[in-house]
Image (tube, rainbow, N blue to C red):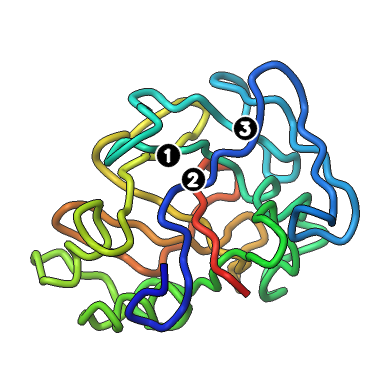
Amino acid sequence: AKLADNKCWMLTNLKLGKTTGTTTLTPANTNISSNFTLPQLITTGTTSYDNPQAIGPVPGDTSSGATNYGYLYNWPAVTAGETRTTMPAGSGNAPYSICPKNWRLPVGGDYNSGIGEFADLDRAFGGNGMEQYNGEPNIAKWNYTGPLKGALSGYWYGGFSGQSSWGDLWSSSAYPGNSSLAFYAAFHPSAVSPGRDGDRVGGFAVRCLLN
């Protein structure tokens, strides 16, 4: 749907991958320049800063309504194979992603900088594009009852956590000061943080933007 920022957002979390084997993505159907193999979904195991990982099914996912969690991905997976070598600190925005063809990852920004497309969306919702924890009206617009229909899918760091409490969404943006970090957005029923930095090993959800 076209939201208040005048951009078209997916209203469900990406759910791409298989429990029984790998998934081959091609430029014909994905925002990539050459074939990319998404690994088989996992629910346990070690984390990696540089090797793609897709995580799921997510506990509590009903595939409908407010608990449509989708799958979780580390940053190398969502960026179709970027590593700390190919996208070091300060390298900007990953050019490709596992979003469908003609869609892309949102641009991110840091904490209270107010920079990035998540911050732009928050301002369009009536917020200030920065962290807010006081129950301002814009926060509800991030959550499932609002226009973004945000699912509280939680995260994964070698195990699942935060399901039904937080929604975490990856951006395309590398962190400027540390090659092990990238930007993401987070929201909660009473809080929103349009800009955060997280370890690239973490498994977060994905919402794509129409180019």
Asked whether residue 99 appears in the rendered view, the answer is yes
- Provide the residue designation for mark 1: 155
Disc 1 element: strand
Vertical comparison of 35 with 39: above or below? below
Amino acid carrying label 3: it is Thr
Residue 208 at x, y percent in the picture = 54, 61
Q: Quadrant of residue 43?
A: top right
Disc number lying in front (1 or 3): 1
- Provide the residue designation for mark 2: 204
Residue 112 at x, y percent in the picture = 34, 78
- Provide the residue designation for mark 3: 47
Q: Residues within 10 Å of mark 1 (few under 14, many from 20)?
A: many
Amino acid carrying label 2: it is Phe
Figure quadrant of the C terminus: bottom right
Q: Is residue 88 left or right of residue 117?
A: right
Q: Residues within 10 Å of mark 2 (few under 14, many from 20)?
A: many
Q: Is residue 3 left or right of residue 23?
A: left
The front one of 171 and 16 is 16
The reply to whether dot 2 and dot 1 touch (C-beta < 8 Å) is yes
Number of numbered discs overlaid on the protein picture: 3
**What residue lies at 72% left-to-right and 60% top-to-bottom?**
101
